[in-house]
Image (tube, helix red, strand yellow):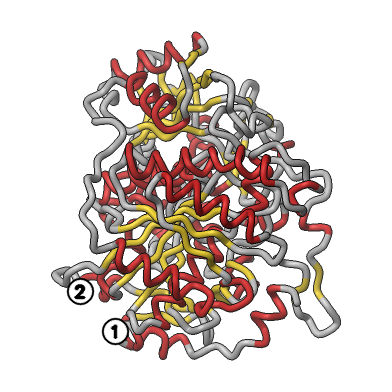
Amino acid sequence: MEDIEIARKTKLENITDIAKKIGIQEDEIEPYGKYKAKVTNKTYARLKGKKDGKLILVTAINPTPYGEGKTTISIGLADGLAKLGKKSILALREPSLGPVFGLKGGATGGGYAQVAPMEDINLHFTGDIHAITSANNLLSAMIDNHLYFGNELRFKKIVWKRCVDLNDRALRKVEVGLSYAKKGANREDGFDISVASEIMAVFCLSKDLADLKRRLGNIIIGYNEEDKPITVRDLKAEGSLTVLLKDAFQPNLVQTLEHTPAIIHGGPFANIAHGCNSILATKLALKLGEYTVTEAGFGADLGAEKFLDIKCRTANLKPDAVVCVATIRALKYHGGASKEEVMEENLPALEKGIHNLLKHVENIKQKFGLNIIVAVNRFKQDTEREISLLKTKLEEKEIDLSLAEVWAKGGEGATDLAKKVIALAEKEDKFDFIYPLEDSITEKIGKVAKEIYGAVDVEYTEQAIEKIRKIEEMGYGKLPVCIAKTQYSFSDDEKNLICDDPFVIHVKDVILKTGAEFVVVLTGNIFTMPGLPKEPAAEKIDIDENGEVIGIF
């Protein structure tokens, strides 16, 4: 049975009842139909002095074509905690239309561990990403309008791009202004995917509306003839952008198929952005529940590193426990097995691929100083010998393992994981960041590349070196770094799955994000506008004679 069919067979509770379950008052929500709602800022203001619950971070190994089920495990874990009588809440990212219609598919879990209504969440939801797209493109329109009417701010170089929430490689480089009669008004431009827009990062890292407006105003959109930065505030655009985002800025409340509350808000990519849901959503969940289960995008080398080094630093947060998700077949794939071979027992490939998992575990446990457990998203083809080998390798590193069967059993399939997470969250840890902000930009990049990725060195283009020099000269050298890198490998080469030979990280460009308050570091062949695969998921998505959506997975 498809995920969408399982979701439709489940009777959901009215969203007002879900809100009551976690202490949200009726006048503190704005329903979007029966099963979705915005939570107003009244709730957080009322609960501001309340002690936070425990924060559980779910991360994973490097992804493979099969998917590791990180979101599915997150949802199942929250349901499993609820089955044990705990007041649990999910805090997840919003899906982007790019992956939904592209390669990755939806992002609402699977089987009996889903958030719902799944087709709404995967498509337009409450319009948050559309609001971000509109704010981004209003800013672009105001820039070009300013140029058209005389360029009073004396723009010489424009660094702001338009965006759209779809994968469209043809838009990476475009020319705008061709309809102008005015000579020289046309210029080269480009599009990012909306979830890579700096406005999405600002949206997710802002503490409140005032902070959102401040950060929006600080965004650098270009440079003048003296090579001085021009900001959104100089263009007098921050007020309009904030107005477009004010409703979207309120977190969204939905539920799992087992009626566990889920706050889904914000969704920057982790390979090209910082990969975490909004600070506002996470902090609200911590006030409302005993346990908040959240996730960070892609593998721990990307999502978890950025969650810890950027989000936790900005929001003064710290996970009480970390769950690293893996599958037996994905580990075999990282051990060199082909797509056909991963479906059969293959102990040599599994043993080789376990090194990918162990590196992620070592990073979280040894580098960040956090307590971690491995959750194996179990499939029926996994053999006892394979599971035994994985368990033995983890025991050698004193790492606990839990076999989760949430796709087939929902929360019941995660009660063992839930019990172990509860115990793990009570243990002391020695959390620290990978780098202090006082380090230079190259020192920060070097520490992430060498300690987290395992690289032997970092190489820079002349353009990157010059931009780093300029950023530090401008006084922004103390910002954290957000490294854009392929999600498929510890290296910056997506085909280097095993990483058993020494490798170098290649920095081709850096981009200062003064609104998000970090420096984006572009490595390898990473793009801020993805392309569609040869056979996109869009080919399989359809609507039936009853008006029901089919094909979303």
Residue located at (32% from left, 70% from top)? 291
Placement of 468 over or under 62, stated as above or below: above
Residue located at (43% from left, 50% from top)? 395
Q: Quadrant of the N terminus?
A: bottom right
**Of all residues shown, which one is farthest toward the left?**
49
Residue located at (68% from left, 80% from top)? 6
* Front residue (pair 376, 295): 376
- Residues under labels 2 and 1: Cα distance? 10 Å
Residue located at (39% from left, 22% from top)? 446
Q: Taking the image as drawn, is residue 138 in sight?
A: no
* Front residue (pair 63, 542): 63
Placement of 198 over or under 445, stated as above or below: below
* Front residue (pair 343, 205): 343
Q: Taking the image as drawn, is residue 247 in sight?
A: yes
Direction from residue 459 to residue 232 in the image, left or right = left
Q: Position of residue 28 (x, y in %)?
A: 32, 81
| First in sequence: mark 2 vs mark 1 | 1
**Of all residues shown, which one is farthest toward the top?**
462
Q: Position of residue 344 (x, y in %)?
A: 77, 53
Q: Amino acid at mark 1?
A: Gly
Give the tally of numbered discs: 2
Residue 47 disc label: 2
User: Helix, strand, or loop for circle 2?
Assistant: helix
Disc 2 + disc 1, Cβ < 8 Å: yes
Residue 23 disc label: 1
Q: Position of residue 11 (x, y in %)?
A: 59, 90
Q: Amino acid at mark 2?
A: Leu
Q: Quadrant of residue 88?
A: bottom left
